[in-house]
């Protein structure tokens, strides 16, 4: 268990800086891109041509890559679950229009555009069973998730630092692979989403950096705990119609691995990046338990590497109901 009173006090102190966090890591609504900036304009004379072009490139995408794009969209569409979870962590006052609650609302507003853009792209592309995608999305929001963080802000910020970096990688890779096949419009869509995720990752990593300055031992123990549990993806309870919660996740994860969009190696690389960004090796003033956690964390990438090197990705493709046959 963690000391809730100490956590709340740390969050209260950091809450005084939230205005700076928002101006540093988020973009004003009037200046940031919107989904319609990248989608065919229905009022344009070229609308039909633009949609046909979009559909042609969508049909040419490799199956695993296309499935990964759909799964990324569904993950983004489950945003209501993420907002409600973060709004409930210790130190966030939902009734207040300033401080942490304003960060959560502003961050959510930026993130919401990602699902909007990809959802509309998929609707227009002509290759998907949109109803099945919508069923998966509704189930994902209904089923929620268990991130292993409880309502602890320290653990939650470790999670969001990791997850925002992972989504940056996933969107960026889909965009890169799309561009290689000439699908420049989808590449731009994924690129701008990935850029948002990169900014958000920097924000959450900065929050953890500040907590290490204020409460280093407890922050170190929280980091260790999250890595011992392993970081689960927010869509780990993904399912299709007729399935139980979580039944689809391994198939989606295998597809992303085969497409080289997000792999076990990426998990290790993100951990190594966080160790470097937070200067874990050089943090001093830790109690004995936190020192042991520090040692565990520094050895963890090598340990995970040995395990990952022995794993093989299943070759068998699963037939997703999301994709029209």
Image: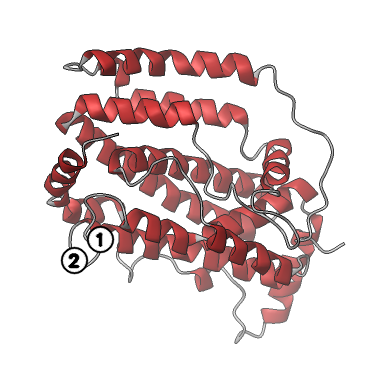
Q: Quadrant of residue 30?
A: bottom left
Q: Quadrant of residue 322?
A: bottom right
Instruction: Please give the name of the residue rendered at 22% of the width and 30% of the height, measured from the top-left corner.
Output: 212
Question: Is 303 positioned to the left or the right of 51 in the image?
Answer: left
Contact between marks 2 and 1 (CB within 8 A): the answer is: yes
Q: Residues within 10 Å of mark 2 (few under 14, many from 20)?
A: few
Q: Secondary structure at mark 2?
A: loop
Q: Is residue 137 above or below residue 181?
A: below
Q: Quadrant of the C terminus?
A: bottom right
- Which badge, 2 or 1, comes first in the chain's sequence? 2
Q: Name the residue nearer the viewer: 169 or 11.
A: 11
Q: Is residue 184 visible?
A: no
Q: Name the residue nearer the viewer: 194 or 42.
A: 194
Q: Is residue 36 above or below residue 6?
A: below
Instruction: Please give the name of the residue rendered at 34% of the width and 67% of the height, measured from the top-left corner.
Output: 31
Instruction: Please give the name of the residue rendered at 53% of the width and 58% of the height, measured from the top-left corner.
Output: 76
The residue to which callout 1 is attached is 101
The residue to which callout 2 is attached is 96
Q: Is residue 193 visible?
A: yes
Q: Name the residue nearer the viewer: 307 or 48.
A: 307
Question: Is 127 positioned to the left or the right of 143 in the image?
Answer: right
Residue 294 pos. (x, y %): 33, 17
Residue sitting at the far right:
325
Question: Is 218 positioned to the left or the right of 298 in the image?
Answer: left
């Amino acid at each position: 268990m963690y000391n809730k009173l100490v956590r709340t006090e740390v969050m209260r102190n950091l809450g005084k800086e939230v205005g700076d966090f928002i101006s540093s890591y988020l973009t004003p609504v009037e200046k940031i891109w919107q989904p319609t900036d990248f989608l065919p304009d229905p009022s344009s004379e070229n609308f039909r041509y633009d949609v046909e072009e979009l559909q042609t490139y969508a049909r040419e995408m490799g199956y695993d890559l296309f499935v990964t794009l759909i799964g990324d969209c569904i993950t983004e569409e489950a945003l209501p679950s993420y907002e409600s979870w973060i709004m409930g962590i210790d130190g966030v006052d939902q009734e207040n229009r300033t401080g942490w609650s304003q960060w959560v609302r502003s961050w959510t507003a930026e993130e919401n555009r990602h699902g909007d853009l990809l959802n509309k792209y998929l609707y227009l592309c002509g290759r998907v069973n949109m109803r099945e995608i919508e069923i998966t999305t509704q189930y994902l929001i209904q089923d929620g998730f268990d991130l292993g963080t409880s309502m602890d802000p320290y653990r939650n910020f470790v999670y969001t630092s990791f997850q925002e970096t992972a989504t940056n990688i996933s969107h960026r890779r889909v965009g890169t692979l799309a561009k290689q096949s000439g699908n420049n419009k989808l590449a731009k869509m994924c690129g701008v989403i990935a850029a948002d995720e990169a900014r958000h990752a920097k924000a959450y990593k900065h929050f953890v950096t500040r907590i290490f300055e204020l409460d280093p031992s407890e922050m170190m123990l929280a980091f260790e705990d999250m890595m011992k549990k392993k970081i689960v993806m927010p869509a780990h309870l993904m399912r299709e119609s007729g399935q139980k919660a979580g039944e689809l996740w391994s198939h989606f994860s295998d597809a992303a691995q085969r497409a080289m969009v997000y792999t076990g190696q990426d998990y290790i690389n993100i951990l190594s990046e966080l160790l470097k960004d937070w200067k874990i090796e050089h943090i001093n003033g830790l109690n004995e338990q936190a020192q042991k956690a520090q040692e565990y964390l520094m050895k963890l990438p090598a340990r995970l590497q040995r395990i990952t090197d022995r794993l093989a990705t299943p070759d068998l493709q699963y037939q997703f109901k999301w994709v029209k046959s």
